[in-house]
Amino acid sequence: MTTEASDMPEPRVLMLGRPGCHLCDDARVVIQRVCADLGVSWEERSILDDPDLEHRYAEQIPVTFVDGERHDFWLVDEQRLRGALA
């Protein structure tokens, strides 16, 4: 049985960033740790793959979303992220 991508649930956490961004590297570590601890799915997307995202978020990366709502930008606070996912 093949599962279509559209059948997969959206990840609870989405991080928008770009390659070479040191703040994105720092945020990724926190997001990976929190999501692994809580068993929560997450995804990372590059703003460079979407001109609209690049235009909207170029000065705010990394931008994190939790359950589709913008959560934070620039820095990811571990306790705040845990609280949002609780």
Image: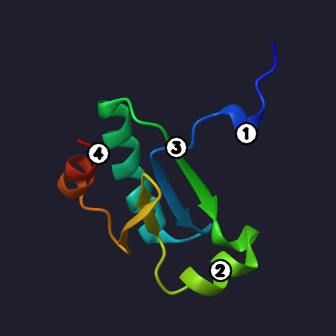
Q: Which mark is residue 54?
A: 2
Up the image or down, 85 lies above or below 68; here it is: above
Give the mark nearest the N terminus, 4 or 3: 3
The label shown at residue 85 is 4
Distance of label 1 from label 3 (alpha carbons): 12 Å
Query: Which one is in front in this view, the residue at disc 1 or the one at disc 3?
Result: 1
Residue type, numbered disc 1:
Ser
Judging from the image, what secondary structure is the residue with disc 2 in? helix
Q: Position of residue 18 (x, y in %)?
A: 61, 69
Residue matched to label 1: 6
Which mark is nearer the camera, 4 or 1?
1
First-in-chain label (2 vs 3): 3
* Amino acid tagged 2: Glu
Answer left or right for 16 relative to 35.
right
Q: CA distance from mark 1 to mark 2?
A: 24 Å
Figure quadrant of the N terminus: top right
| Residue topped by disc 3 | 11
Mark 4 or mark 2, which is nearer the start of the sequence?
A: 2
Q: Name the spot of residue 12 as percent of width and height, x first.
A: 45, 45
Circle nearer the viewer, 2 or 4: 4
Q: Secondary structure at mark 4?
A: helix
Q: CA distance from mark 2 to mark 4?
A: 26 Å
Q: Amino acid at mark 3?
A: Pro
Report the Cα–Cα distance between label 2 and label 3: 21 Å
Q: Quick one: SS at disc 3?
A: loop
| Residue 6 left/right relative to 25 | right
Name the residue at 45% across, 69% down: 63
Residue 5 appears in which quarter of the rendering? top right
